[in-house]
Amino acid sequence: MNPRKVIVNDTTLRDGEQTAGVAFNAEEKLAIASALAAAGVPEMEIGIPMMGPEEREIIGAIAGLRLPARLMVWGRMCEADLEAAAGSGAHLVNLSIPVSDIQLLHKLGRDRDWAIAAVARIVERALDTGMDVCVGAEDASRADPDFLLRMAETAQRAGARRIRFADTLGLLDPISAYERIRRLAEAVDLEIEMHAHNDFGLATANTLVAIQAGASHVNTTVNGLGERAGNAALEETVMALHQLYQRPTGIDVSRFGAISELVAQASGRPVAPNKSIVGEAVFTHEAGIHVDGLLKNVLNYQGVNPKDLGREHRVVLGKHSGSHAVIQRYRELGIDLSEIAAAQLLKRIRFHANQTKRSPSTAELQSFYRETAMLERFPNLPG
C-alpha cells in the first residue's frame, strides 16, 4: 500500500449515537470529542443540526472547544438541513442523498434525475456557508455503478470536496468493495470517504480494502458502535493500518483503552471481553502451548504488541494450562514449585475450572497451594 497518510473521520458522535437505545448527553459528547482529538483523530462527525436546538447547542459547544480536529455535521440533501447546519461552527457538512433506485423510489418517491438536480443545486448553495461539502451517497453499494459515477461527477462539478461511499446495509465483501472504490477513484478527483457497516462482520475489512483502492478518508466509531451491527471500529481500523500496512494516521493508539472505556460507559454498551484490540481478554492466555511459547519468546504468539496499547500479556490458569504456566504464576506469588508440586496443582486447577467455569483467583491459588502442601505432609488425611 502507498504510505500516504489515511484520514480517519470518526463518527462515534453521530452514527455511533444512532445505535438503538444510545443517547449521549452534552457532557459525554464533549468528553468523547476531547478524547478523540487528544488521541490525534483528525476529523470527527459530531451531530445532526436538524435534530433541534439542543443538538445544535451541543454541536456549538464542541466547536467552541477549538479542538485540533476538523468537525463535520450531517444532514440530508435539502435546504432545511443545510440551513440548520449553517453557522454550526463545523468545517464540513455531509449532505446525504440515496443513490440506489430502491431508496430513491421507495423512500423518497423520486428518480435519478431528481437526485442529480438536487446535488447540483444544494451543493452550490452549501458552499456559500463557508463549509466544505461532502456528498453522502447513501446505499451506494446497491446503486447502479454508472449512476453512482454520474452522481460523483455532478458533485465534483458543483464544487463538493468529497463523496462518501456508504455501504448502508453492510452488503459488500472486500472484493466488491475494492472494485467499487477503485472505479470511483479512477473517475473523479474528489476525496473519497468509505462508510462501512458491519452487518456481515466485514466493516473493518471493507474499510481497509477501500483505502487500498483509493479512498482517502474512512469513517469509524469507537468500539464499532452504530446502527444494527455497527460500523468499522476505530481501534481495529487504525491498528490494522499501522501494523499490517504501515499506513500512518497520526493517531496515538495507547489512548484506545481509555477512549473505549469512556464510550462504553457513555453508551451503556459494554465491550465484549474478546473484542479485538480493546477487549479485556485479548492479551490473556491460558492454553499451555501458547503460554509456553510466550514464556520462551513473546513473538511466538504476539500479533499485536500490548505495550503499544499500554497493556501487558496476562496469563491465567485453567483447564488448558500446562505445568510451565503454573510454575510461572506461582513464582509471581512468591512461591517456587517443584515439577511434582506443579503437576499436583495443575490437577486441582483443572478441577476448579471445570466446576466453576472460570480461572482461580489469587486467593484460591494460595488456598490450593496450602491444601497441596498439607497433603504432602500428611498424605493420610481424609478428603
Image (cartoon, rainbow, N blue to C red):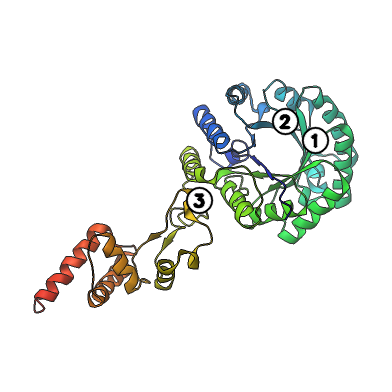
Neighbourhood count class around disc 3 (C-alpha, 10 Å): few under 14, some 14–19, many 20 upward: some
Residue 377 in the figure: left or right of residue 286: left
Residue at x 24% of width, y 75% of height = 344
Percent coordinates x, y for residue 311 in the rendering: 44, 51
Inspect the image, locate mark 3, and give the three-letter code of the amino acid beneath it. Answer: Asp
Check residue 161 in the rendering and tell me which mark sits there, or answer none: 1
Inspect the image, locate mark 1, and give the three-letter code of the amino acid beneath it. Answer: Arg
- Closer to the chain start, of discs 3 and 1, is 1
Is the residue 325 above or below the residue 244 in the image?
A: below
Q: CA distance from mark 2 to mark 3?
A: 32 Å
Q: Nearer the viewer, residue 307 or 85?
A: 307
Residue at x 26% of width, y 58% of height = 362
Residue 230 in the figure: left or right of residue 342: right
Neighbourhood count class around disc 2 (C-alpha, 10 Å): few under 14, some 14–19, many 20 upward: many
Inspect the image, locate mark 2, and give the three-letter code of the amino acid beneath it. Answer: Leu
Contact? badges 1 and 2 (CB < 8 Å):
yes
Res 351 seen here: yes
Check residue 380 in the rendering and tell me which mark sits there, or answer none: none
Q: Which residue is mark 2?
A: 92
Percent coordinates x, y for residue 54 in the rendering: 58, 23
Percent coordinates x, y for residue 366 in the rendering: 21, 62
- The quadrant of the rendering that contains the C terminus is bottom left
Percent coordinates x, y for residue 1 in the rendering: 72, 56
Q: Which residue is mark 3?
A: 308
Residue at x 74% of width, y 22% of height = 83
Res 278 seen here: no
- Closer to the chain start, of discs 2 and 3, is 2
Say what secondary structure mark 2 lies in.
Answer: strand
Contact? badges 3 and 1 (CB < 8 Å):
no
